[in-house]
Image (tube, rainbow, N blue to C red):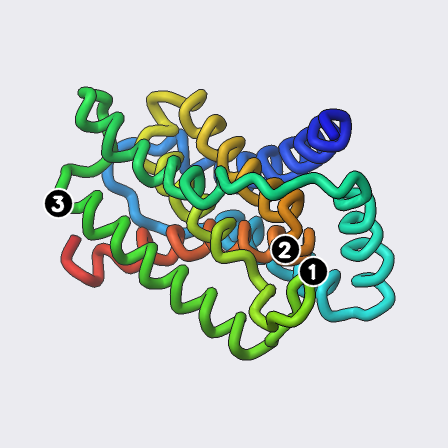
């Protein structure tokens, strides 16, 4: 069981974290309150979403990747861990906690709360629209709201906000946020609640939701 977890963590961290970091690197070096959005910031989550969608809805690919990975993860018949129900909120909570501890963020309290709430609303809208449009079946069967992973969306919108607020001054914190978010996606797969494709799409939606909110902020008088 431990070897499976170690392998999947390594693959996800090696894939999602560097991809996200590469697409967002330029933004972390900016100073001040630049709310612009670049093609790289759109391309990274779009690639995750497109990959997850392709895996989920191309039958041959879904069988080869999602089913095989699911079979491998569930082979030992382990019991479900429920950590991700709480850990999903760690990245977004960290923004508030670290600011309260005195770390410098890009925005003040009012703007952080508004940006966080807006990102949550956008991500929830995307999540529910996709879930009730595609009606993909869960790995355990009988429930048709698998695509995308809501827990993963929550974790990644928080990780992206953590990166934007603190990543410029504290890059290690930004990386930690993405590692935690990746762990949430892993746990959803390991606990038989989601396919790998759900998690990939969820990661993309979470990142994109926060990017859109930061871009919209000046128009909303942030």
**Residue neighbourhood size for the residue with mark 1, other residues' Cα within 10 Å, grouped as few (<14), some (14–19), many (≥20):** some
The answer to whether residue 174 is left or right of residue 74 is left
Q: Are marks 1 and 2 in contact (CB under 8 Å)?
A: yes
Q: CA distance from mark 2 to mark 3?
A: 35 Å
Residue 120, compared with residue 110, is above or below; it is: below
Q: Residue 167 lies in what quarter of the image?
A: top left
Which one is earlier in the sequence, the residue at label 2 or at label 3?
A: 3
Secondary structure category for the residue under label 3 = helix
The answer to whether residue 41 is left or right of residue 213 is right
Q: Residue at x 59, y 57 (%)?
A: 201
Q: Which image quarter holds the N terminus?
A: top right
Residue 107 pos. (x, y %): 20, 38
Q: Nearer the viewer, residue 179 or 141?
A: 141
Which one is earlier in the sequence, the residue at label 3 or at label 1?
A: 3
Residue 67, compared with residue 69, is above or below; it is: below
Residue 78 pos. (x, y %): 70, 39
Instruction: Give the residue pinned by disc 1.
Output: 139
Q: Residue at x 81, y 50 (%)?
A: 71
Secondary structure category for the residue under label 2 = loop
Residue 190 pos. (x, y %): 66, 43
Instruction: Give the residue pinned by disc 3.
Output: 110
């Amino acid at each position: 069981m431990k070897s499976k977890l170690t392998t999947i963590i390594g693959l996800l961290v090696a894939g999602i974290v560097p991809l996200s970091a590469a697409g967002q690197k330029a933004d972390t070096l900016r100073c001040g309150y630049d709310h612009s959005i670049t093609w790289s910031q759109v391309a990274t989550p779009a690639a995750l979403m497109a990959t997850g969608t392709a895996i989920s809805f191309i039958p041959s690919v879904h069988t080869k990747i999602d089913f095989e990975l699911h079979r491998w993860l569930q082979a030992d018949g382990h019991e479900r861990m429920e950590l991700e129900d709480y850990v999903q909120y760690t990245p977004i909570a960290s923004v508030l906690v670290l600011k309260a501890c005195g770390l410098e963020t890009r925005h003040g309290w009012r703007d952080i709360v508004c940006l966080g709430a807006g990102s949550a609303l956008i991500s929830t809208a995307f999540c529910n629209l996709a879930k009730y449009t595609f009606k993909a079946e869960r790995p355990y069967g009988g429930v048709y709201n698998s695509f995308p992973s809501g827990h993963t969306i929550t974790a990644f919108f928080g990780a992206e906000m953590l990166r934007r607020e603190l990543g410029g001054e504290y890059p290690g914190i930004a990386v930690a946020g993405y590692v935690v978010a990746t762990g949430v996606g892993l746990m959803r797969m390991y606990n038989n609640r989601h396919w790998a494709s759900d998690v990939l799409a969820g990661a993309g939606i979470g990142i994109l939701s926060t990017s859109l909110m930061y871009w919209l902020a000046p128009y909303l008088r942030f």
